């Protein structure tokens, strides 16, 4: 079947290049076809994801290799990038400063009475418990 052959080609190409548009052009299909196949074929979808992961890892390795070469060539931007991302002394820091003021506003007698009544109606307080003047919020 033609679609099965194209799916295999897609997987092979994705292992080399993690860019769906480029792979679709190489295989001779539209990129939406790949996404349609992914949505309707779980096995193909899993194979695509795995191939993409492998390909992305390959590109990451290549990028790190190029970065190390740039560092060896004394490229200051590459050196700074490496240090900021791999050395605690040079990492970007954000300093947050501020203050917090805590204040308590006491309820007046009317507010206190309303709260007590609400708690009593909710069954969270027995009325006799708050009739004593010593109990106040």
Image (cartoon, helix red, strand yellow):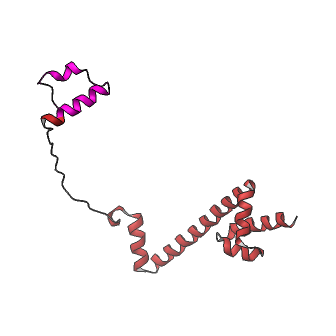
Quadrant where the image shows the N terminus = bottom right
Which residue shows up at 64% across the image and 66% down it? 55
Which residue shows up at 24% across the image and 29% down it? 117
Q: Residue furthest left?
A: 133
Instruction: Report the magenta residues as a range.
Output: 112-137
Give the x, y percent position of residue 10: 74, 67
Q: Is residue 137 above or below residue 21?
A: above
Residue 3 inside the magenta-drawn segment: no
Which residue shows up at 32% across the image and 28% down it? 122
Which residue shows up at 13% across the image and 34% down it? 109
Give the x, y percent position of residue 26: 74, 76
Q: Is residue 84 left or right of residue 22?
A: left
Quadrant of the image occupied by residue 34: bottom right
Give the x, y percent position of residue 35: 70, 64
Quadrant of the image occupied by residue 85: bottom left
Q: Residue furthest right?
A: 1
């Amino acid at each position: 079947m033609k679609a099965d052959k194209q799916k295999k080609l897609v997987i092979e190409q994705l292992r080399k290049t993690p860019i769906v548009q480029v792979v679709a052009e190489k295989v001779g299909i539209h990129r939406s076809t790949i996404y349609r196949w992914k949505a309707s074929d779980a096995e193909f979808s899993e194979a695509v994801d795995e191939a993409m992961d492998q390909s992305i890892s390959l590109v990451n390795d290549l990028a790190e290799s190029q970065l190390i070469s740039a560092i060896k060539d004394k490229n200051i931007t590459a050196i700074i990038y490496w240090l900021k991302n791999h050395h605690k002394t040079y990492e970007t820091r954000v300093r947050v400063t501020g203050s917090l003021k805590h204040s308590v506003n006491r309820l007046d007698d009317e507010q206190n009475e309303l709260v007590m009544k609400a708690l009593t109606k909710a069954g969270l307080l027995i009325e006799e418990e708050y009739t004593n003047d010593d109990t106040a919020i």
